[in-house]
Image (spheres, coloured by chain):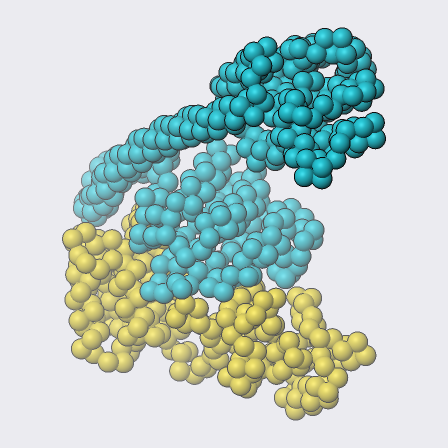
Chain colours: A cyan, B yellow
Amino acid sequence: MSHGGSEGLIVYVYWYIAAFDHWYSVMLVFMLQILINRELRQPRVYWTVLAMAVGLTLTYMLYDDYSDIVTFLVNLGLLAFVRRKKYFIVTSLTATLAYILFSYFGNYATAAMFALGRLSINAWQGWLFEIVGEAIVTGCMLAVAVGFRLLHQRYPQPFADRMMLNVTVSALAVASSAFFAITVAADNYNIGSGFVGILMLILVVILLINAGSFIYVFYSYTIRIRAHRQKLERRQYDLYVQNLESSYQNLRKFRHDYQNILLSLSEYVQTSDDPALKQYFDAVVTKSQQSLTRDFGHFDNLERIQDKSLKAIIQNKFSVARQAGIQVRLEASEPVGQLPIDPVTLARVSGILLDNAIEAVNGLANGQIAVAVIKYPQMVELIFQNTLRQPIERLDELFVAGKSTKGSGHGQGLATVRELLDPLLNVTYEVAANHQFEFIISIESE
Amino acid sequence: MLSTFIVEDDVEQLATLKQTVANHIMINDFDMELTLATSQAQELLSYLADHADVDGLYFLDIEYPGQTLNGLTLATKIRDMDVNAKIVFVSTHAEMAFLTFERRIEPLDFIVKDLGPAAVKAKVETDIRIAYDRYTKQGAVSQAIFSYTKGGQLFNVALNDVLFIETGTSRNKLVLHLTDRLVQYNGKISDEATAHPELFRVHKSFLVNPSQLARIDKPNQRGYFDNGEAVDIAVRKMRDLVALIKQNELTVTID
């Protein structure tokens, strides 16, 4: 490949050194690609690469101009072997550009070292120059490979995102065209390699700034849009829930009033002497009583729970339970705010307890699940209760992992609940299982 | 004398309740009276504030529209002033918070109005009899109580239900094993041993209620309870424990 060394240092004194140099350069470009593109790791690619490298080396021995471009173009033949074409172009361009950049600086560094050591070029020192130079370039290429891998691991999204790949491809294409243009110009119009080096450096800096700012703008924009949309959806949902809750409150109030009116009316009817009226009234009351206790598809008192984590898990699990035909009840006599416990822990623990309850009650006639949120001056207690098939004798064994009491469905998970709650200084629990299974979590204010 | 109180915001229902209670007391000739029947919750509290040492049976509705108090706050305040208060909640099913009341108030009963006037009347009468029965026995056998605190709140259980206390898996937490309940709470086992002389420290991790022990396995140094739970017994505590059992004539099998 065209090493820019013409300032008094003529490296290619011997043809075999030149041949090795060409071959090694081409192989470096391929190596870097194989390192950063997993898809290239297949035997047929290795054979093709070997053939390409030999072919390219032979060509360069005869005609050295435009070698970088030729390498890149030949290299594109590997497209046949890969499925992710765009990603291949990115890795291929990265490899070529990295090679061009570092071969310049590797060459410079070696030349500078030789100049400092005042070494002249003979057969032996030609090899030394070659080896030192290529070692530096190889080191730089390996650093690029590591950097690329790290980038890929840390930010996998842009590499998978079609939009981002397009942007990267076009940015790299611009960069490489500029590079090729500069090198061709330098080769053909006798421009000093120092000047070319500075040009390249400037180009690289400009490109990096451009790419960086583009990526920043693009990402901050998409993130902002997403956040905005989420906020909007959240607000709409909250509003919807609020509306639902208030209309439900009205319904509940009406139900309460109506029920009380019926009750006092019944006092009058019972004291009257009209048997027909009594009979008719009883029939009407029983019927309306049934419709009053019907499920309205809402969970009473849910609006009093302001802890989002708890509210979400109750809503979710209660819906599941209700769909399974299980009766659910939520008690919250007073509004309860954010609980002094890690929301994820709370969600996990409540989830396990409610899942267990659903499992235990499922298929049971008149099965019921109840949750109570009780507020004390310095504490909030959560009670999870469900109907039990049969009493559980050994409560202490419930907490041993893998020792599930058959049929009760409470063995699984309680070991996890214990593991999660035990380390928390302000949290304790109680469990009882005679008529009902009952798990109480006491969360003291810190 | 056992005083009876009724708080019900619906005038008709209040009148019916009043009549049921008064009739039942009169028919059975109990040492009871219907002290106050009101639609204003505050009125009951004022009465209690003015009269010390009231032994009461309270029939309370749960929601009083337009009043600052509700059934739960009212019952909590009653408990503060009348420790042995026998509280019965009379309300519609939708208003009942069974778990909450059970945990906070330990009421005598819940009466669900939806069941109809006849059922309500029957339950009110049963509750009067139960309350009166408890009231008459109250002085004779005062039941020993074990209490624990959580978040500044005192919880009481019968001492007879206590099997043993165990040091928990994490620091400063104890596990109280009751006949039908496991309770984790904050405390130190040495403090509990001093506070409850009726319990016996059989091991550095176990504080046992000797009267609940079913069997002692001397060679293996284990103590067993009726439900199969077991504790370790330290060698140097074994002799004292056996002596204690013999001295109190407890029915514990010793192997």
Is residue B96 visible in this depiction of the protein?
no
Q: In the displayed structure, would residue B157 be above or below residue A221? A: below
Q: Quadrant of the C terminus of chain A?
A: bottom left
Q: Quadrant of residue A17?
A: top right
| A137 relative position to A16: left or right | left
Position of B90 compared to A170: left or right? left
Residue at left offset 77%, top offset 29%: A121
| Image quadrant where residue A142 sits | top right
Residue at image location 64% in from the left, 30% down from the top = A108
Q: Position of residue A244 (x, y in %)?
A: 29, 34
Res A314 quadrant in image: top left
Would residue A360 be seen by someone viewing this image from the given angle? yes
Vertical comparison of A129 with A260: above or below: above
Task: Give residue B132's position: percent from left, percent from top.
Answer: 36, 72
* Numbered disc total: 0
> Which quadrant of the rendered structure holds the N terminus of chain A?
top right
Judging depth in this view, the residue of B153 and A150 nearest the camera is: A150
- Give how far across and how far down residue A230 sits, in percent: 37, 31
Q: Residue at x 53, y 66 (%)?
A: B184
Q: Nearer the viewer, residue A396 or A236?
A: A236
Q: Depth check: give the residue in front, B45 or A283.
A: B45
Residue A36: give x, y in percent of width and height.
Answer: 67, 27
Q: Residue at x 83, y 27 (%)?
A: A123
Name the one closer to the observer, A181 or A284.
A181
